[in-house]
Amino acid sequence: MRYIPETKREQEQMLQDIGLNSVDELYSMVPKEVLLKELDIPEGKSEMEVLEDLQKIAGKNLVYDQIYRGAGVYKHYIPAIVSYITSKEEFLTAYTPYQAEISQGVLQSIFEYQTQICELTGLDVSNASVYDGAVAAAEALFMTLERNRDEVLVSDTIDPQTLEVMKTYCESRNVKLTLLKGKDHKTDIEEVRAHLNERTAGLYVESPNYYGLIEDVEELTKLVHENKTKMIEGVDPISLAIYKTPGEMDVDIAVGEGQQLGLPMSFGGPYLGFMTCKKELMRKLPGRIVGETTDHEGRRAYVLTLQAREQHIRREKASSNICSNEALCAMTASVYMAAMGPQGMEKLALSCYNNAHYLQTKLNELGFVRKDEGEFFDEFLTSSPIDAEVLEKKLSERKILSGLKVEDQILWCATEVNTKDKIDELCLALKEVLS
Amino acid sequence: MKLLFEESRSGRKMDYLPEVKTGEARPSDKYARKSSLRLPEISEVDLSRHYTKLMKQTHGVNDGFYPLGSCTMKYNPRVDEVTASLKGFTDIHPLQPKDTVQGAMEVLYKAEKLLCRITGMDAMTFEPAAGAHGEYTGLLLIRKYHQDRNDDKRVNIIVPDSAHGTNPASAAMAGFKVVNIPSDEKGGVDLEALRNAVGEDTAGLMLTNPNTLGLFDPNILEITKIVHEAGGLCYYDGANLNAIMGRVRPGDMGFDCVHLNLHKTFATPHGGGGPGSGPVGCKEFLKPFLPRHEVKEENGSYDFYDPQKTMGQVRSFYGNFLVVVKALTYILALGKEGLKEASGKAVLNANYMMNKLKGSYHVAYDQTCMHEFVLSLEDLKKETGVSAMDIAKGSLDYGIHPPTMYFPLIVHEALMFEPTETENKETIDEAVKIYLELYKKAHEDPEYLHGAPHKCAISRPDETKAAREPVLRYRYDD
């Protein structure tokens, strides 16, 4: 395939115009010894052949009928309207909206996204997204740093992927990260108290945490604030429709993975990380931010703003190096939240909550016992009466993805797509597997 | 245009989900949300129309010419969108058993092999989600390499003054000190300045070649040699790879690692600012330090493994996977000749356009350019008061996305044009005509251009006000 419009004759004409005979002459600056004779990759193909090739590769992946695995990535129903809107070619093919006069559409949509994220979290300011939830959490740690506060505390009940990214980011910036041992799969408030000191800039906790449990964020926030330490909460955006918001608990920064807001699982990406904070931390937020202003005639207009924080102005002194973020994913999240509406989001959250609790009850009857105490939203751990790998394999044969093996237990998840009928089907399958 | 929130009416709703049959329980009061959730309440038809309105006020590549320098706004083939929407790619969980995602791993493996051949590298990671993220990852490779050899003195990254702003920002994030060096009179790296800058403290050099002036540095082999002899490594910023793919490889020019922007060179769409993908390639000796989740193949089956001395992760899972699917589709479709033809045509279009503008506008460095070129409007501004910004804004009225403005920083009143290979001759001729008209207008009626654009949805927005009194979200009336 070629996507080059010129005919050979036109090309010759253009070359003639600039006084050359061949395209190769344009590369006369390249040292001869490194000029490539031939690129060692296959010949091109027609669109029909390439599509067939890719269909064949995609066909090697198993698309499950039912999924009971979350651990950071969740299967949800996405209303049909969402992808119709986000695949509009103008949105798809535009660059970052540097030229506000011809980008009001994209800019307004980011402004709307920022507002929705603020409403969801109860906080004041949101950026236009970062790469994913893990990067959002790592970037949030740096927002808490001050001249004499350069250490951060992180609970070991968080998603291990997020922790991995935080470790990489902190090591390169010479920020000391201390991992706090949890108790019964929850953050241990005494452990936090014991580690707070005058250098502690921030504490990061997730709720629901990796094991599905709701953390006592309010108490933790009070505690760290007494030490002038900032509180960062990693949140599940769906759960916020029914759970206390970071804003209601006086949390300083909230971050999270936005995949659940209308994006398919896609083997890990693209997703988006959302970041929101209290007003006083506004200028420490990394990434793009859209603001409202007026044009010369006084009409309402939107622009990329607070750019004094950014790399193209501050270079090595920038608050972060982010430029391309996940704009189209942010728009997807915005369309999704608008389509669902407040009642839809609440119904969604309650579906996840009740389906997961129903699943837990049913699993318990089959000998998958929950040992953790405390509230959970849509994920929970159980023991397993059979080897977790055997279970995975046997269910996989029935096109059902089991919970994830975590330590010596299984982390189960149910969302709105795991309805009562489906869960009952799962239980029948489990009975077969167990017998 | 109204905001979603202004179109909202209390009680209006859609119902996309079935009734819950598993119970009516709610979280306990201690943990329950107290404030109401104020999201827009809107019908599907109004939602659809809302975004159609926004769409009409968004300029994408398919709306018209988009010569935004350094951003490679080429046409995004639609078959790439089709392959990336296959259920076998979109509906798989990243933590599925490995034998159920062999196709996904094959995508990563194949894309790695092809891109390594295109860049002259030995291994590649797809974890970084964008170009700047790739820079950060590439610099961590360099950092890990020196640390592993206990060479703690190497704390400096050398960056030419023409570099993208992300280069120094990424270097700082990766824990390095930034040493800026000037360009020579031809726009290339000043070899003397480079020789003086390197030493025992040099961790590496970050370079774009062709550079941000659109010029291929003919001293490239000498440059990488100087850095290597001082014990430093050479990092290739792949933002401008579109000029040279299929013709010369960073690996052959002496670079040790490279990041690519799949959303530039390999035609995946920008989405109004992402998702992108910024894979990082490296030579064999840096491979042990790559992020986790490298893909290997044994007897036709694929598996992930963690490189021996891995830096860990810079993002969750395996990066922006679907973007990699799109880029792979593109590479397989174009093939060896197609990629070479694309780069050649990109360079031809740029030279053709530069040549047509040269009679009037001042070309910052008047020599054969690569895929982009830079004009300096300093003289025009002195003569007429019309700035690079004014000309750029003037072009908006003709349906052209302006070139990159005021970059690179070493050229005053800079406008940087990158026409890309997918534009035809008529489009470029038409654009040239428009820019020559604007040049004339600058002399005849500078006031008109100060006030441009005149035909867009808005005139120039007040950016100072936006930054001074930030309004970053819609406020409800309460």
Image (cartoon, coloured by chain):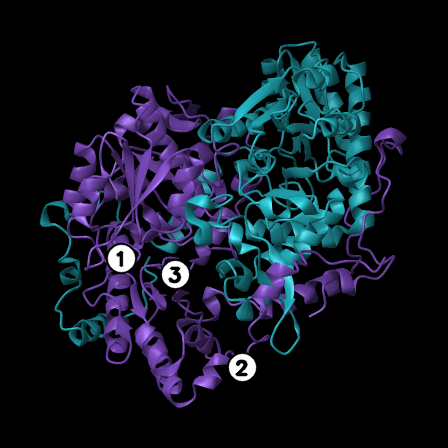
Residue picked out by circle 3 = B74
Q: Is residue B281 left or right of residue B314?
A: left
Q: Quadrant of the N terminus of chain B?
A: bottom right
Q: Residue furthest left?
A: A32
Chain of the residue where label 2 is placed in the rendered structure: B
Q: Residues within 10 Å of mark 2 (few under 14, many from 20)?
A: some
**Earlier residue among tags 1 and 3:** 3
**Earlier residue among tags 2 and 1:** 1
**Earlier residue among tags 2 and 3:** 3
Q: Is residue B233 left or right of residue B85?
A: left
* Colour displayed for chain B in the image of the structure: purple
Q: Is residue B174 above or below residue A304?
A: above
Question: Judging from the image, what secondary structure is the residue with disc 3 in?
Answer: loop
Circles 2 and 3 on the same chain: yes
Q: Where in the figure is residue A113, as x and y percent of width and height? A: 66, 53
Question: Judging from the image, what secondary structure is the residue with disc 1 in?
Answer: helix
Residue picked out by circle 2 = B454
Q: For residue A105, what is the image quadrant? A: bottom right
Residue picked out by circle 1 = B343
Rendered cyan, the chain in question is A
Q: Is residue B469 above or below residue A5?
A: above
Circles 2 and 1 on the same chain: yes
Cα distance between the residues tagged 1 and 3? 11 Å
